[in-house]
Amino acid sequence: MKQTSWFDWLEERDPIYVELQKLIDESTIYIAPFTIRKNAHGLYEIESHDTFDCCGSIEKCYRYLSEYSAKV
């Protein structure tokens, strides 16, 4: 039996998470102010005029973007 939380449900319906799910290898999306790219190695690159960061999973990328939006 798998335990779930409300956060699992929320992620799947969040517009940002939905957009991240559309990324395939070597594709790019824009979620202001970031350009998010999934590279050939499956890493999510997050870039803006003053940021370059990388996440190893869609969940970590989503949390990175969520933390940013909470600060703004």
Image (cartoon, helix red, strand yellow):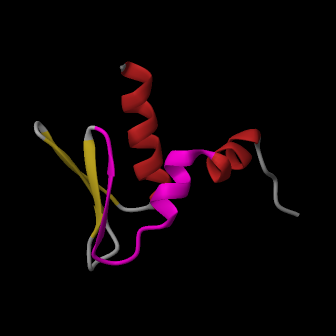
Q: Which image quarter holds the C terminus?
A: top left
Nearer to the camera, 42 or 21: 21
| Quarter holding residue 26 | bottom left
Q: Please identify the residue farthest to the right as the structure is shown.
A: 1
Q: Residue at 26% x, 38% y: name it.
A: 33
Q: Is residue 68 above or below residue 9?
A: above
Report if residue 17 lies within the magenta region.
yes
Q: Is residue 31 above or below residue 18?
A: above
Q: Position of residue 40 (x, y in %)?
A: 26, 79
Q: Position of residue 32 (x, y in %)?
A: 31, 39
Q: Residue at 44% x, 23% y: name it.
A: 70
Q: Which residues are magenta?
A: 14-32
Q: Is residue 21 above or below residue 54?
A: below
Q: Residue at 46% x, 47% y: name it.
A: 62
Nearer to the camera, 59 or 72: 72
Q: Please identify the residue farthest to the top as the structure is shown.
A: 72
Nearer to the camera, 1 or 58: 58
Q: How many marks?
A: 0
Q: Position of residue 24 (x, y in %)?
A: 40, 75
Q: Residue at 46% x, 58% y: name it.
A: 20
Q: Position of residue 57 (x, y in %)?
A: 43, 61
Q: Which image quarter holds the N terminus?
A: bottom right
